[in-house]
Image (cartoon, grey):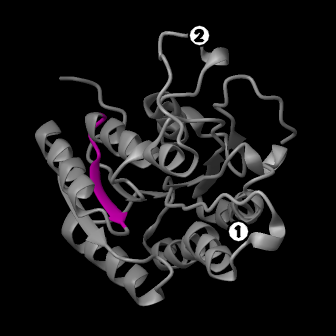
Amino acid sequence: MENLQLNNQNVLITGADSGIGKAVALLFAREGANIAFVHYNDDEDAAKTKSEILEIGRKSIVFKGDINDSEFCKNVVEKTASELGGIDILINNAGTQFPEENITNLKEENIRKTFNSNIIGMILLTKAAFPYLKEGSSIINTTSAVAYLGHEELLDYSATKGAIVSFTRSLALQAKPKGIRVNAVAPGPVATPLTEKTFGEEEEDQNKPPLERNASTEEVAASFLFLATNASAQITGQVLHPNGGLIVNG
């Protein structure tokens, strides 16, 4: 029998209709996990992701909604635990960004959307899911290299990603006595629908060596898998940096 790293574990992940989240969902499914995932408003992509998970032979549940809504978060968690039989791994991956070259042109509405999606929603969903997690469970948050390096066009987005690093470290301290590990992944440039939509970046030639191109979502997903397995049993409160060689502190 094939030795699956996440056999029969139940995963709840946000933002898995495309990009890094989808790559993580499919990789985890191939490793034996059942996948519940949340998307905001892309029904077509979400349906495709669910179909691909089912084709792998794992269970999948899809939720459409806003994680900035605490009642929605509670419903997602309760239905996931009920239908899958529990939650073993929580992956907070959902995010949005609105690039702006000048701070004076930042729209307050977009600032609030960015914080609501990227960090406030993350905290609300984690709050709802935490009582369902147990010893050996894992929480993995998606931050970014911009949390450390900054980005001249992503002031508010970078700020939320820095907040995610601090949230990860603090929750790891609180969760340690419960035997729950909390870590994060901080990708550098990645070819995703979000970056293409906001910056007009197209996927680069993936045959180039890692240091000379954007990462693929599959390459980044491997870091999430490592943090979800017992291979990382001694790692909590940490951030992995699959960024192609960018030097960051922390």
Residues at marks 2 and 1, CA–CA distance in whole angstroms: 40 Å
Please name whichever residue, 40 or 202, is drawn nearer the observer in this view of the structure: 202
Q: Main secondary structure of the magenta part?
A: strand
Q: Quadrant of residue 63?
A: bottom left
- Residue 212, image x and y in percent? 65, 16
Q: Quadrant of residue 159?
A: bottom right
- Residue 93, image x and y in percent? 51, 56
Which residues are drawn in magenta? 31-39
Q: Residue at x 78, y 49 (%)?
A: 151
Kind of residue indicated by mark 2: Pro
- Residue 101, image x and y in percent? 76, 57
Q: Residue at x 18, y 23 (%)?
A: 1
Q: Between tags 2 and 1, which lies in front? A: 2
Q: For mark 2, does the 10 Å Cα neighbourhood hold few (<14), some (14 to 19), or many (20 or more) residues?
A: few
Note whether 9 is above or below 104 in the view shown.
above
Left or right of 20 on screen, residue 87: left
Left or right of 238 on screen, residue 200: left
Please name whichever residue, 179 or 155, is drawn nearer the observer in this view of the structure: 155
Note whether 50 is above or below 29 in the view shown.
below
Left or right of 14 on screen, residue 31: left
> Which mark, residue 174?
1
Residue that label 2 marks:
209
Q: Quadrant of residue 107?
A: bottom right
Please name whichever residue, 118 or 127, is drawn nearer the observer in this view of the structure: 118
- Residue 166, image x and y in percent? 77, 62
Kind of residue indicated by mark 1: Gln
Q: For mark 1, does the 10 Å Cα neighbourhood hold few (<14), some (14 to 19), or many (20 or more) residues?
A: few
- Marks 2 and 1 close (CB-CB < 8 Å): no
State which tag comes first along the sequence, 2 or 1: 1
Residue occupying the far right of the picture: 249
Q: Is residue 59 magenta?
A: no
